[in-house]
Amino acid sequence: MNPVSDVVPIQSALISVSDKMGLADLATGLQRAGVTIYSTGGTRRHLEECGVEVLDVAEYTGFPEMLDGRVKTLHPKIFGGILAIRDNDEHVDAIQEHDIEPIDLVVVNLYPFEATASRVGATREECIEQIDIGGPSLVRAAAKNHRDVAVATSSEQYGDILDQLQEHGGTTVDLRKQLAAEAFDHTATYDRAIADYMLGESISGDFPASMHLTLRRKSQLRYGENPHQRAALYLDPSVRSANLVAARQISGKELSYNNLLDLDSALEIVRGFAQPAVSVIKHNNPCGAATDAKLANACQKALDGDPLSAFGSVLGFNRTVDVETAELLCQPGLFIEAIVAPDFQAGAVGLLTSKPRWKDNVRLMQVGRLDDQPSGLAKRFISGGMLVQDADRMTSAPLQWKTATEAQVPSEMWDDISFAWEMVRHVKSNAIVLARDTSLVGVGAGQMSRVDSVEISIRKAGDRVAGSVLASDAFFPFPDSIEAAADAGVVAIVQPGGSRRDDEVIEACDEHDLPMVLTGRRHFKH
């Protein structure tokens, strides 16, 4: 077989697309270069309305569109023109004998199956009608014969094709190879979405028998967790809820691997609160968090949680960052790496990127409204495979909790208890948090001993431990932590319960007149 041709002229093109973004510019450029354009149905009408001269595929093939448009391009005169190898004499003789025109460029994107299937209220019939048949066949045929044919499946590729057409009169082999690879990736992703939809209808049990991830590389990062590690960021196009990967970066330097991890944790914390909430993250653990009726107040309370650790931290907001809050963040001596929020007021952006010493280095990430909840599944790679579990978002409600001690919880203390219990699930196990005035005042994270976590949280809180509420992500196996908390001035405890020594722990609380609430739900975070 002869080597692949370098530059192949574009003399004819077939265009049939669902997404018409950028199409008029492409078709106008092709027409200006003298390219004959074939098209069908809605695409043909769109191009004609844009002043582009188009030949109707049905007129060319001599066979009308039928079955409500299900059959349009599935014809030998179309596929022969795409699949014929130009320097194969038998192929050339065959297409000439049957009056088939070679097609040098195929521009196709597929029916919006995934968008339809993810739409609330979409019926099965609507989804099935969005399964494209002719489109994937055209794309695969053109990609297979990339030695002679270029294929475009995205408007992002149109510019490169027009540039090469203007510069070379056709497409180079390198571009055709790249377009072919992207085309097969496009059809594989499309088929995967259909298969997942079908499997979702037919599987038995809570988890599918097979899981497939389709991710697109969004960016190459400077490095990973450490400078000697390479890293990249990938986008999951199936995610519809507000998320960090799809966020708009308003300002600042390129995000690092560690920035992304911390920002994701910051966002996950604040989206769980109905009131204005702010989280402060350092090394993937909250060192501060708070809620308040006013965002600026919540921000100040969150920063006060651990001022030393807050230096060089990332912040998460569940409300638009306003000017008053931005003024607060511009105070001398404070350094913030990055901020994620639904939005930023223009005045707030101006302040954050000009007033503090970090100026426009701070990364500002706009994620949009936090109305939609993320996926109910949490996925985590391990050596040889992946663990999948329900995401830990089902926090038990206070009505389900039990006060196990003789001392009852004063009504004014319930807000702090609920806040502490919400926060402890975001801290690495063994996790202990101290909360006061719906804000974190002390955190003990990731210790091998729960006693160590209690002691660390008390030390972090300092004078603020007096009057605080303590939450533990799992039960206390011994009463020693209760003794330490009571001696420090903790006024209430919330924990799952379930230890063999619950009675001893309850007895220790009663000795100190310390109310303890049992939730019946554990919140390990490994």
Image (spheres, grey):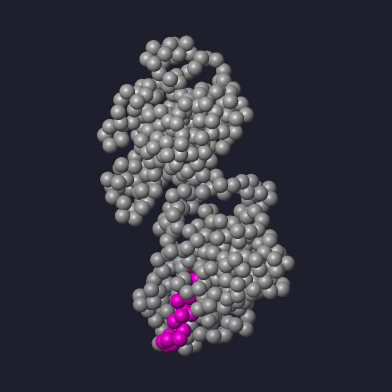
- The vertical placement of 315 against 230, above or below, is below
Identity of the residue drawn at 39% across and 44% down? 112
Read off the magenta span: 407-426
Give how far across and how far down residue 433 sits, in percent.
53, 74
**Viewer-proximal residue, 23 or 457?**
23
Q: Is residue 63 left or right of residue 423?
A: left
- The vertical placement of 240 against 292, above or below, is above
Give how far across and how far down residue 39 sits, in percent.
40, 31
**Viewer-proximal residue, 342 or 69?**
69
Give how far across and how far down residue 139 sits, in percent.
44, 31
Identity of the residue drawn at 30% across and 42% down? 128
- The vertical placement of 480 against 42, above or below, is below
Identity of the residue drawn at 63% across and 49% down? 221
For residue 11: magenta? no
Rendered image quadrant of residue 263? bottom right
Question: What secondary structure is the stretch in magenta mostly built from?
Answer: helix
